Every structure is written in structure tokens, then in C-alpha cells.
Amino acid sequence: MGVSLTKAAQWTSSGTGKLELMPMNESLLKEVLRSVEQLVSRHPQEAEHVFEEPLHWSTTLVASDFKTDYDISEFNVQSHEKDSEGQPLLRLSPPTVYVRSFSQLSKLVHLAADKKLEEARTCLEENRDAVVKILGPRFADILEREDTQTDPVDEDTAKDSEVKVKLFRLLQNMDRQLLSKLLEEISEQVRLDPAAANNDVESLKQFCSGGDERVLKSVRYTSDYEFSNGCRAPPWRQVHGEICYLIIEPCDTEDLHITCSTAGVYLNAGIKQEGAESGYERTSDTYTDLLTLLKSRSPYFAEHINKQMPKKDMTSKPQKSQQLPSTQKTQQRKSVQMEEQGQPQRSQPGGKKYEPSPRWSNQGLVSPCGKVEENNPGQKKKQATGAKSKMKAEFSLSSLPGRMTPQKSKTPAGAMTGELSSDSSTESEDEELSDRRLQIKTEQSPDYWQIYKLLKFLKRGDQTATVLCLCALLDLNLMQEGCQLDIWDIGGIEVLLNLLDSDEVKCQIGSLKVLRKISHNMLICQTILDMDGLQSIVKILDRPYKDLKALAAETIANVARFRKARTTVRRCGGIRKLVKLLDCVPNLANMSPNQEKDVEVAHCGVLALWSCSKCNRNKEAIRVAGGIPLLGRLLKSPDVNMLIPVVGTLQECASEECYRIAIKTEGMIKDLVKNLSSDNNELQMHCASAIFKCAEDKQTSDLVRKYNGLEPLVSLLGKANDKKLLAAATGAIWKCSICKKNVAKFQEHKALESLISLLTDQPIDVLVNVVGAMGEFAKVAANRGIIRKCKGIKPLINLLTETNQALLVNVTKTVGACAIDRDNMTVISQLDGVRFVWSLLKNSSTDVQASAAWALCPCIENAKDAGEIVRSLVGGLELIVNLLKSTNNEVLASICAAISKIAKNKENLAVLTDHDVVPLLAKLTNTTDDRLCLHLAEAIGHCCMWDGNKASFGEAGVVAPLVDYLKSHDSTVHYHTTMALYQLSKDPNNCITMNEKGVVKPLILIMGSDDEKLQDAAAGCVRNIRLQALAGKITAPKKFSVGTAKSCGKRL
């Protein structure tokens, strides 16, 4: 929110107005919202910090949008939460809202729902000094300096609260992440090419020598530092497409300060130092290359450069103007984003600008490219080869200044008729095409010239010639990458897409057959998407011709491997149209030719849906369109080729709960289990993956067992060479083994032994699933012995040194389950397993911390000389006490459980007490989480065994919250709370507090329990209170009726 907001964001009026409406700013706003949500969820204490000044802006929310937690009076709203001075942390006085903490800011964002981006935009626009208002000017100055080495805790800031300093560091880290995320997004969408700019600079330096013949005095960079991506511009300028800055000294004019960017080159205001933002402003038109800019600014350079060109050519190889042979006046090619393949973009030759085709002009979609020049072969020969731009890397995003995403121009087939022969300029144009290929790849395929001629005829021929050319193209090996790139390079993609807009079915079929094959190339898929070809293909799904539908769907399946392509299919109604294609009966014994064609169309349709289903919104669109029952019907097909995409789509969609429920209720589990026995590994893998995602539900897991699916899953473990299949099978076994009945069934087929053999030399995803399954198996006592006998404990301990967090969570769970067996615990101790598990408490993941703490509990309880083992871990007790400061309830519960085990040893309890375990436990007592209450009460009870801790707990205010724990509906909470209260009641002052809080009545009710230990503890606590009452220190407890006493027992 510091550098990212002031420098990376794009503002109107040179950075002093509002945020421009562009994708980059939208990405920034989304990242800011995500970062605020993370701050509130992960750092609740810092999120409650009250801002120095409130953030205020004009909101679209009204009083009726606020529900609970707010005081609402007519149009005004105030939050219940207030600061130390009694001021509300959120106040709405329409139309202005005032917010004074991140927690309130997060709540307001949730209330805004689909308007949250608009709210974030307005908030940032009206609070340009947001950091100053949040932290104050001192912290804001440090953040704006971007000084990563500066420690904010100096003499001045030391006076501020610890929470404020932590919040500063969080905002500083957020700022870096925002800037890094923007740079990453730009680098994924746009290919920077600093190498091309560097080549131009090195070539210009050649003209600075030669004495009197030189045409330039000097060429130098403003910065010698080069980033890893080759750019010399600072990161916050790289997001605007800037590569480097030059100072060029001509022989006849003043020094020229030049910015080289991916959009071209232009003069800047004179960059003196990187901090001065005004120096980056553009002060001239944008030129395609340095040569053109220098010619326009230096008459001396323009006059003498042509004389020098034969001696010192600007390029390593001559490049000529590149234009496909055509009698049309419009250029039918567009620049293509090629970041997927890392290929350079091709710029327009000689700085020419082309006119959009009449089709786009008539619709008002004119690109700012200017007019076209007539194709004049004579003129082409006169063009200087050195005048061509070498700026190969260009932003092709419409969001960046100076560029618009180019529109495609299509020419219907048959619109141009001509001779199927070469004209007089063919030889010259062939040479130009050859030169242009140097920018793409160094070698031509053997069929290059044949493809060139066929595409030329496609553009000029009538319907018959078009069909013949398409047939000839299909006779070539279009699955070969060389042929695919030839078609792309010559401009064939647009020609083929033009044919889709014709009314001739044969031409459309031929075009789609070619596109279906060549669209396996990622570069061509990107080109089709950029040319809006996907919309044309989706429209064909409405045509009545089944062959057309099948080809269109299969082409969509290839192109939709891009996220943007999947989004495009959904937005133009493609999901609904594809789902309609699935309506057929695939399992008829005797099908008519028409029915077979329907099945073929359905197969192509499900292939396309499979590609599209990798997007969550598309999954929902498939469901809404009625795709689930149709997929369930196709799942009964006997054809493996049909089943693979069907099951692939289902397992992809099974990440959504609605699909998991449908798979269970629509009877698909039976078919998935049946196909586990297929001979096709890919089908088996997808079926196992679907079960993996669904079997965590108990009913689904029972259905897998009911349909005899457990044995096939175990048999898949034998296919260890197929890692994807192995990962899916082990995952399915893991989730099915959550049910104990399934574990018993698995062991009939020796599943545990097979899993143990997979603990070494496997990918991480396989290991995660294997260890997870072993953890479920180890919950059965007999299986813990099998793990030891099969020597599975040592590889488990070895896995504790891995870094994958999901793996560490599962390994610690499994080690903890094994440690319940004392013989296993002996092996774990010999392998130093306790130390490895304890070291995981330092892990940054709260899941790993919690899992490690839970594993320590049985380890400490069942280890021989557990007290000595714990004390031998240097800093171990201090580490575990410090984790009581965590904000994660699962971590706190597990740490309390571990402390209750450690505190059974008096020497360890003494060390815990020295590390202030008592006040830290006391701070946690105001919780409503039953699990935390249970283990917290247990830890307090055991810590009371050390002299002085009982009184310390009382002074820390532990007694009153513990009495409230007795109101819980969980009997185990009652048990451990009663035990803790009994220990605390041994201090007279605690008895007074207990009596005041009304503990006697619930304790007398607990005395009626069947558990003798619980009865004794409750009775003992009441006895201690009664003794203090007899001593006159407290008022005697309320008397109860005889009936109540009889019903509660006579332990008192």
C-alpha cells in the first residue's frame, strides 16, 4: 500500500487523480483485498489495532446493509466495538463511512459483497495517504523509503506499542508482496525483451567511433545495474513496460534522454535519479525504434546515417519488409502474444501502419493503426532494410498505454477469386517470408512452400478451390510441430478462421479439421484466442450438422487449455451448448448410424467440458446447465474412449461439494468402482481420483466397500511405475480407511504391508497419501504391531526431515498413532524420533505445529524416562511454552495437551513454571472452544501440582472462567474441569472465588456421575469449600433439599 499504490498503480492526470479503469489496477485492488483478508484471519491482534486517523470515503452502502454488531438509527450506523475513548471503530454518516481498524474494514468488505472492488477503489482514491492514517507519519516515511534494512524500532518508534510495530512489519511485507505479484502477473501475460533493446544500443555505439565520420558522440545507460530479467528500469517502472533509460549525445543537438519500453521508445523528462517520478514522464511521441527517433531529432544523424549504413548495418542479418502476397489493401495479420512459447513478436515492417478491414470499420471497431499503403513491389525494393524496428518484445495487453489489443479482420471464403498461379512478385515475397521466419525458428519444414502456396490459394480461390486446398492441407502431417508453425507463420490461422464465418458447410468442416489438428500447439491456441476465433467456433455448436458440432467441440477441447480460453467459452454461452451435446444413449446394444453419430458428438462434447472444468465457475455452469445427470448416463458407456473424459470431468468437478453429493446420490460410485478393474491405466487413475475426492464422506466410503471397490484399489498399488495412478490409488485408500470397517477389509488383502513398501523413493504426492493411510490404519492396535514388524517406523522417522507441509502433518499423525504402542515407542526413541517431532514445533505452518504437538502426547506418555528425554532437548520446554502465544485454537489445544503430559514430571513442571506457563495458560481461559477448554483445564490441573501455582492461577483470574466450563455440554470438559477445580480448591482464596461463582450446585450434580474419580474430585472440591465456610472465611453454600441430595449421591 506504499510503493505499490503510489508507483505501481496507474493514476489519471499524471498520478494525481483517480485510479484508471484497467486490468492492472483491478489486479492491484484484488490483491489489496486479499491481503487485508489474510491479515485479519492470520493476525487478529494486529487487525484490532486502532488507526491513528480514520479512513473515510464515499460508500455505496446504506444503513440497511448492516446487520448485527452495529447500532442502526435511521440512516446512521455505529459499530459496537469502540476505542479506548469510546469512539466507534466504524461509523456511517451517509454517504461517508469512517473506519478505524482492519477488522472493521474486513467486515465492511464482506457487507459490500459484489461491490467490494468499487469500495476498495474509492477508499484508495480518497485516502492516498492511507499508511499515514493507519500508522502515523514516522512509520509511513520508513515504508515510502523502501529501505528494507531499516528497523522501525528506533528511539522514537520504541515508544509505540508492540502491536503497532508488528502491524508496520505486516504492511511492509504486504507492500512487497503486492509489487511482486504485479510483476509476476505482467511477466506471465507480457513477454519483455530487454535483449532487443540492448542489441540496438550496442549497434548505435558503433556510430560513436570513426573520428570525423562519427554520427553520434556517445550512447550510455543511466544505470549500470541490470536486473535478472535483463531490465535496467526499477521494478515499479517495469510494471509499466519500461526496460531501460538512455542518454544519447548527438553531434548537432542537446543530449536526448530516452526511455526504451515494450511499447516503443520515446523521450523522457530527464531522469536524474530513480526517486524523482517526474523524470519518467513521456515528452514526445512513441517511435518504433531508436533509429527512427534519432532521425526525427537530429538532422545531422538523419543526413549521415545512410552513408554509414553500408559499413555498419544495424542488424546482424538484413531484414526486409514482410507482407504476404495479396491484392487486398488490408493487412490480415495481427501481432500475437507468444509468452507461452517464448517466441519473439513480429513488429510491422518499416514502421508501416495498416488499415482495419471494412468489416471492422463498419462495426465501429477501428484500431488506432492508421491507413494502409498500397502494395507496391517497386516501393518495397526501395525500403531500407536498416529502418526496420528491432523492438521484438511488445506488450499486447489493452490495459497498457500506447497499445490496444489488435482486432482480427476476416475475409469470407470465395470473396476473392483469382488465378491459381504465382504473380510477378512471388519470388520477392518468398524471400521476405524466409527472412521473417528467422524471428520464429531457424529451420523450415520440408512442406513449408507447399503450405505457403495452399494458403495463398485459400485466400484467393473460389469454393471448389478452397475445398481442394483444405483436402491437400489435411494430407500433410499436421501433427508435426514444424507444419503447425509454418501455418502460423504464413498467416494461415486467420484464413482458417475466416472460413468458419462462411455459409459453406464443406469449407467449415475442412477448416475445423485443420484447426483440430494444429490446435494441439499452444502457440496456435493462443493465436486463435487472440483473434477471437473461439467465439466463432462456439457459434458453430448451434448449427444442425453433427459433424460440424463434433469438430467444433474437439477444437474447443484443445484451445481451452488456457484459463482465458475457458472463461471465453463460458461467457459466450459455450458451456450450455456443450452440455446439450451430451444428450444421447451410449450403451445400446444395436445402435443406428444416427445414434452412433450422436455418441460421437457426445464424446467430443465431453472432451471440451473436461478442458473447461478446470475452472470453478465453469463447474458451476456445467451443473446449472444440467450436466451432472448426463455425465452419469455417459458413465455407463462400455467404450473406454468415452469413459476417460467422462470420469476425468467428474473427478475434476468432485472438488465441489455439490458434485460429490451428486456422485453419491446418482449411483455413480458403482460405475466408478466397476471401472477400477479396467485394463486402461488412465481410466483407472481417474476413477481412483474421483473416489479419493469423494470417499471422505462416510456414506460414500461405505458404498465403495459395498460394491467391492477396496480390493481393486489395493491391486492398483502393484502398478508402482505409473506415479499418477499410484497417487490416485493411495489417495483413495487413505480416504476410505477413515472408516474402521474398511481398514479391516483392506487388511484382508495385506494393504498395510503394500503401503509400507511405498515409503521410499516415491513422489511427494504419493508419500502424502501413503502416510495418511498408514495413520488411519495405525488407529487399530493390531496394525501398529504390523508397522513395527515390517520395519515401517524408520522410514517414517526419516520423512520427518522433509519440507512439504502436508506430508509433515500426516507423518506426525502416523508417528503419534504408532507411539501408543510401547514397543513402537522404544523404536521411536532409539531413532531419536521425539527430537525430530519436537523440532517441527518451529515450523511456520500452524497445521504442522498442531500435528507435531498432538504426536508428542503419546510419545511422552509411553516413553521410558520421558522426563529425561524432554529435559535433554535444549530449549524444548521454552519453545512449547512460547507456542501458548499462538492465535490458532488447534495449536493452543495441542500444546495444552502436551503440557499436561510434560507436567506429570515434577522437574519438568518446575522448568515450565520458570518459563511463565501459569500466566500464559491463564490468558487462554476466556475461550468458548470446547476442545481448547478440555485440554486447557487438564493442563491447569496438572500444573497445580507445583507448590505456589494454585495461588498463582487464582491471582491470574483462572477460577471464574473454569467454573463457566461446567456449563458445557461436553462430558469430557466437565471431567477435566472438575479435576482442575479440585486442585485449585486447595488454596483458600480460590475456594472463596468458586463459592461466589456458584460452583457448588453443578459440582453436587456431577457427584452423581458413574465415574468414581470424577465423583471424588467433585466431592473433594465441595469439601474444601465447606471447610472454608466452617472456618468463617466464606458464606456457607446454599442448602439443598433431601431429594436433591439423594439423587446426587452421598459422596459428600
Image (cartoon, helix red, strand yellow):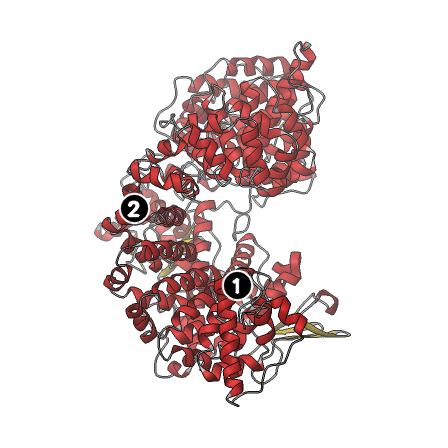
Q: Which residue is mark 1?
A: 973
Residue 1006 tag number: none
| Other-residue count near label 2 (Cα within 10 Å), few / some / many at <14 / 14–19 / ≥20 | some
Q: Quadrant of the C terminus?
A: bottom right
584 sits to left or right of 177: right
Which residue is painted at 50% across and 81% down in the image?
991
Determine the image quadrant of residue 615.
Answer: top right
Residue 707: where, in percent of width, then height? 56, 27
Which residue is painted at 49% across and 13% down in the image?
475
Indicate the secondary structure of the residue bearing disc 2. helix
| Residue 960 visible, this angle | yes
Amino acid type shown at disc 2: Asp
For the residues bearing labels 1 and 2, Cβ distance under 8 angstroms:
no
Amino acid type shown at disc 1: Val
Residue 6: where, in percent of width, then height? 48, 66
Instruction: Look at the picture and state if 526 lies above or below 1047.
Output: above
Instruction: Look at the picture and state if 494 lies above or below 113.
Output: above
Indicate the secondary structure of the residue bearing disc 1. helix
- Mark positioned earlier in the residue sequence (1 or 2): 2
| Other-residue count near label 1 (Cα within 10 Å), few / some / many at <14 / 14–19 / ≥20 | many
Q: Which residue is mark 2?
A: 823
Determine the image quadrant of residue 784.
Answer: top left
